[in-house]
Image (spheres, helix red, strand yellow):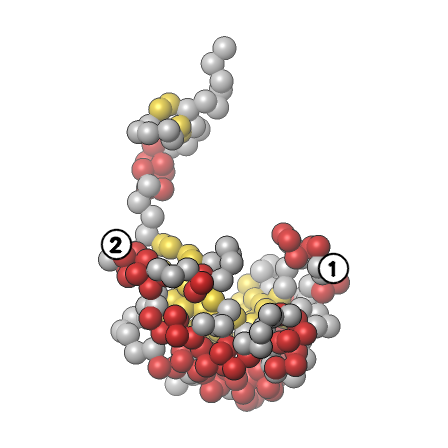
Amino acid sequence: MKDPVSAEKSPGWVHVSPRVAKEKWEEALRPDQYAISLAGEPTLYPHLPELIDLLNQTGGTTFLVSNGTMPGVLRQCHPYQKYISLTAPDRETYLRIARPVEDYWDQILESISDLGHETDAGRRTAIRVTLVRGINDQDPERYARIIQESGAKFVEVKAYMHVGYSQKRLTIRHMPLHDEIDRFTRKMLPHLSYRILGENTLSRVICLEQDL
């Protein structure tokens, strides 16, 4: 008996389910957005700058998310949007949370400060602050100071989400509500030349934009 979800053959070993519209499948073979994240620290890949340059040549948009520990590599990378994660307001909190093999706090600050020097037309820079209740959700003024000095175009303030591998290290009680994200962000705003651009309550995230 024919498998109801078996697929018609396409070039090579790929099989396409009959439930997939042909135009959608063909569209999927021509991606125009490339997100480089979620699989370890991308700046450890020795050919990352060349990879991004190749992807840029396709006319698509490239997004790079980094922990900022390798500023020299980041300077060579020119994605459409460059995200740097800011996991703590100070060195002590960073060392307690990240538990790095070495102290990379100065390198992270260097990477963040470089964001303001991105001059390529049409490029975007962003800082991502993921708050974990009771762990790094303190001292909004110090977070604001780092952000203000960075010159980043955008800032995402978001809640830690209790999903994936993090469930082995944290509990659901570490996940802030959107109201907590909102209060924390508004405590930063008096120390920032940024404005609230938008928010998503389900995702528990607020996006700030430079108010120039």
On the image, the x and y values in percent for residue 3 come to 49, 18
Residue 138 is left or right of residue 73, and the answer is right
Q: How far is mark 1 from mark 2, CA to CA? A: 42 Å
Q: Residue at 36%, 38% (x, y): give it.
A: 24
- Above or below residue 107? Residue 176 is above
The type of residue carrying mark 1 is Thr
On the image, the x and y values in percent for residue 204 come to 60, 64
| Secondary structure of residue under mark 1 | loop
Residue for badge 2 = 58
Q: Do tag 1 and tag 2 residues touch (Cβ < 8 Å)?
A: no
Q: Of 176 and 34, which appears nearest the observer?
A: 34
On the image, the x and y values in percent for residue 30 come to 31, 45
On the image, the x and y values in percent for residue 206 come to 54, 70
The type of residue carrying mark 2 is Thr
- Above or below residue 30? Residue 75 is below
Q: Of 208 and 165, which appears nearest the observer?
A: 165
- Above or below residue 163? Residue 138 is below
Residue 55 is left or right of residue 199, and the answer is left
Residue 162 is left or right of residue 38, and the answer is right
| Secondary structure of residue under mark 2 | loop
Tell me which label, 1 or 2, sits earlier in the chain: 2
Q: Residue at 63%, 52% (x, y): give it.
A: 164
Where is residue 46, by image quadrant?
A: bottom left
Query: How many labels were placed on the picture?
Result: 2
Q: In which quadrant is the C terminus drawn?
A: bottom left
Residue for badge 1 = 171
Q: How many other residues sit within 10 Å of disc 2, few (<14), some (14-19) or many (≥20)?
A: few
